[in-house]
Amino acid sequence: MTVNNRLRKLARDEEGFSLVFVAMGFLAFLSVSMLAIDTGMLMTARNQAQNSADASALAGVTALVFDDWNDRSTSGPAVQNALTAARQNQVMGGTVTITPADVVFLNDATGTSDRVQSTVYRDNSHNNALPTLIAQYFGIKTVDVAATATAEATSANYATCTLPFTIPDRWIENSDGTGTPDGPWSPSSTFDLWYSKGSNQNGGVALPNPDVYVPGPASQGGTGYGLGDKGLLIVLKSNNQNKVSPSIYNPWDINGTTGANAYSSNISQCNPSQQLPNGSFLLPETGNMTGPTSQGVNALIAEDPTNAGWNTDLNCPTANLGTGMTCLAPSGGIVPVPPGTTPRIATIPLYNPTVYAEGQQSGKSQPQLKVVGYLGFFIEGVDGAGNVTGRITPITAGYNANLGPGTASFAKVIRLVQ
């Protein structure tokens, strides 16, 4: 065969050309593998990073509510809890980077500083970027992942499992019923808008410098109970229906369950049919309820398996759960009581003292008990006269957008907002 013939044959020969298609197909397969494997890994990492940021922001807000509302320092519980929660939620088996500077306290739409924003990283700038699996063969050795979340301690606008007695929300104490300056506010103060009847010739006349109540937290211009009142000791006494005082409680009916037995039962057990919205009016319970109060509170205390007590050093209700003294959470009415909780952390509805006082002044036959919030109360004990001793403690309650904004300055709803 001549050289020319050989060259012509080689030019027409297609043997081995399939290898070109195989090589091109393999390259396409690698590209698709890179897209499927590395993109899937990146999406998983992004979700895990968001979980880490979410956990961090929620932990920060929870610490504000339950530990210290005012401590926003880098060493404070809010920042430290946010850092710990973020690092416990790893991304693709690696710990995220987050520093105190990445935990930021923000204001909500009303200007209240009740938000915590956390940002977590796994990226090149923090020397912990995610290594790729297939893309590294195409020159993409690492990818950056970051996530941000914001959580908020929203004012509650409804509560369930509240106690069937109520006390007034906090106010600014200016003067007593004789017009004498009488500040500052204390659990034994009385809410006075008019001269006391019989105190002098001005009985029933408006005081020149009356006490002042504004619903809501101080940060929004309100005067109500705030998380700074945590640990305050109050002895609640049965109401004589002629005073408004933080230490005097009014019994009320839960969903029409009237009578001493129902009242006592509603103290010791959560009434599942009850949902108490902000702004609603309570129906006062008639009759002497001191005995049923004592019976209900004693039954509630008997349900507590932890034998909880108030710890002044930790400023919370505690029990020794085998690892030292531990702060307890509300049991939420669940029986048997879950570990780490106590039924003695109760929710007390707060009423508007101005509405109550104006109702008395106008001669209404029953107290006007308008709900403006909810107070956490750790019950330490009760005596035979129905006097309930306890301390203010943080709680969470509910939020329903259909009920309008909450004015509660104390009970909060912890939720993610971004």
Image: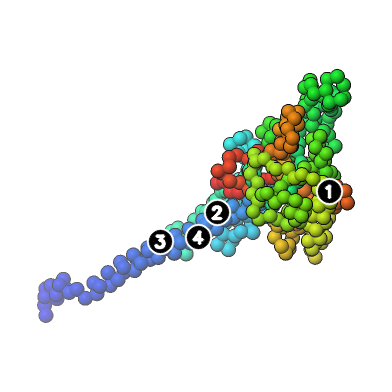
Mark 4 to mark 1 CA distance (whole Å):
59 Å
Which numbered disc covers residue 384?
Answer: none
Taking 212 as reference, is 189 left or right?
A: right
Mark 3 or mark 4: whose residue is earlier in sequence: 3
Foreground of the two, 18 or 201: 201
| Residue 75 can be seen, yes or no | no
Instruction: Name which residue type carries label 2.
Output: Gln
Mark 2 to mark 3 CA distance (whole Å):
22 Å
Which numbered disc covers residue 290?
Answer: 1
Q: Which residue is drawn at 77% across and 26% down?
A: 193
Mark 4 or mark 2: whose residue is earlier in sequence: 4
Q: Residue 333 at x, y = what percent?
A: 70, 57
Q: Residue 324 at x, y = what percent?
A: 81, 61
Q: Residue 76 at x, y = what percent?
A: 73, 46
Which numbered disc covers residue 35?
Answer: 3
Rendered view: 201 above or below 118: above
Foreground of the two, 95 or 30: 95
| Residue ID for mark 4 | 44
Q: SS at mark 2?
A: helix
Mark 3 to mark 1 CA distance (whole Å):
72 Å
Tell me the crowding category of disc 2: few under 14, some 14 to 19, or many 20 or more residues within 10 angstroms, Cα based: many
Q: SS at mark 3?
A: helix
Instruction: Name which residue type carries label 3.
Output: Leu
Tell me the crowding category of disc 1: few under 14, some 14 to 19, or many 20 or more residues within 10 angstroms, Cα based: many
Tell me the crowding category of disc 4: few under 14, some 14 to 19, or many 20 or more residues within 10 angstroms, Cα based: some
- Quarter occupied by the N terminus: bottom left
Foreground of the two, 165 or 170: 165
Instruction: Name which residue type carries label 4.
Output: Thr
Mark 4 to mark 2 CA distance (whole Å):
10 Å
| Residue ID for mark 2 | 50
Q: Residue at x 79, y 32 (%)?
A: 191
Front: mark 3 or 1: 1
